[in-house]
Image (cartoon, rainbow, N blue to C red):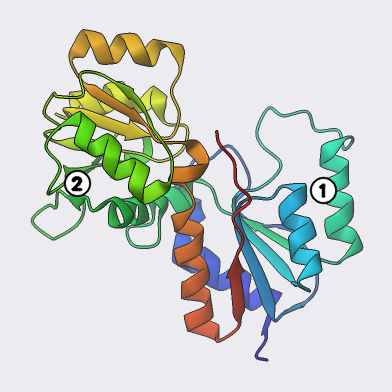
């Protein structure tokens, strides 16, 4: 089995995802240092206790996730579930890598790019062939969904592709038109999507004001699940690592209905 140094992996991830470009809510990159050499990586959406236990069971040297640890404004004390997770990682010398906004935003491997692939969206492109983006940190993508006409059609597409019945706000017969999307908990960016000309907005979660904003602007809203919309970036990143270094990378989906 091939192997690489933890330092080499960390450097490659930093070059690939460029975390220094983002003002994030957590540290991006190597969050907990473990073994100096990596042969097997487990990827997942969140560094939960269940994912860590699965990584230990499979003899992994590193865990790579979208939702890591040490979030801004969280309680800094190490106790309860946080202690359990950290203790398990340290006991088994696991490297824990987390990439939040950098993994949302990557133009090929990112959550938004990969969700477009899974749902069959065609992003709007600028004159240089780059996706047209908007919103905070340019995280929102814009485009169309060929073969989908109504909000009801889009709901069926999401349900079939993501295996989630999405939350829909709007008339299921209204035209989808131009779609904006941003994975995860980006309901607060809906106003930026509307300002950019979107007729429909898709994200993972909804909050109470979402309903009123959608109704009062006539914008269709699709809440497709935080976890469900963010399973694909870390899988693409893991595959890129496997291709680059010829080491074993396995994605484990710890299901989450949120």
Residue tagged by mark 1? 85
Q: What residue do we see at 72% from left, 47% from top?
A: 48
Percent x, y of residue 135? 31, 33
Q: Earlier in the sequence, mark 2 or mark 1?
A: 1
Secondary structure beneath label 1: helix
- As measured in the structure, the alpha-carbon distance from the residue carrying label 2 to the one carrying label 1 is 39 Å
Residue tagged by mark 2? 132
Residue 139 shows up from this direction: no
Q: What residue do we see at 74% from left, 64% from top?
A: 55
Image: 172 above or below 150? above
The residue carrying pointer 2 sits among few (fewer than 14), some (14 to 19) or many (20 or more) residues within 10 Å by Cα, namely some
Of the 4 image quadrants, the one containing the C terminus is top right
Of the 4 image quadrants, the one containing the N terminus is bottom right
Image: 224 above or below 108? above
Camera-nearest residue between 162 and 9 = 162
Residue 201 shows up from this direction: yes
């Amino acid at each position: 089995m091939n192997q690489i140094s933890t330092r080499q992996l960390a450097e490659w991830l930093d070059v690939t995802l460029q975390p220094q470009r983002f003002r994030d809510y957590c540290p991006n990159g190597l969050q907990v240092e473990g073994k100096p050499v990596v042969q097997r990586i487990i990827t997942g959406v969140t560094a939960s206790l269940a994912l860590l236990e699965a990584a230990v069971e499979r003899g992994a040297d590193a865990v790579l996730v979208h939702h890591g640890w040490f979030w801004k404004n969280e309680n800094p004390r190490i106790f309860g579930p946080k202690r359990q997770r950290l203790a398990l990682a340290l006991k088994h010398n696991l490297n824990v890598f987390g990439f939040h906004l950098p993994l949302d935003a990557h133009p090929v491997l990112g959550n938004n790019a990969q969700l477009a692939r899974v749902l069959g969206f065609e992003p709007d492109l600028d004159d240089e062939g780059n996706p047209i983006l908007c919103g905070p940190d340019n995280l929102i993508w814009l485009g169309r969904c060929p073969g989908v006409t109504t909000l009801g059609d889009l709901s069926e597409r999401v349900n079939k592709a993501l295996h989630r019945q999405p939350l829909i706000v709007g008339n299921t017969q209204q035209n989808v038109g131009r779609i904006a999307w941003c994975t995860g908990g980006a309901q607060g960016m809906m106003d930026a999507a509307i300002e950019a000309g979107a007729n429909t907005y898709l994200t993972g979660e909804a909050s109470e004001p979402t309903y009123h904003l959608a109704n009062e602007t006539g914008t269709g809203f699709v809440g497709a699940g935080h976890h469900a919309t963010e399973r694909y970036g870390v899988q693409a990143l893991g595959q890129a690592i496997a291709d680059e270094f010829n080491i074993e990378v396995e994605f484990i989906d710890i299901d989450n209905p949120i």
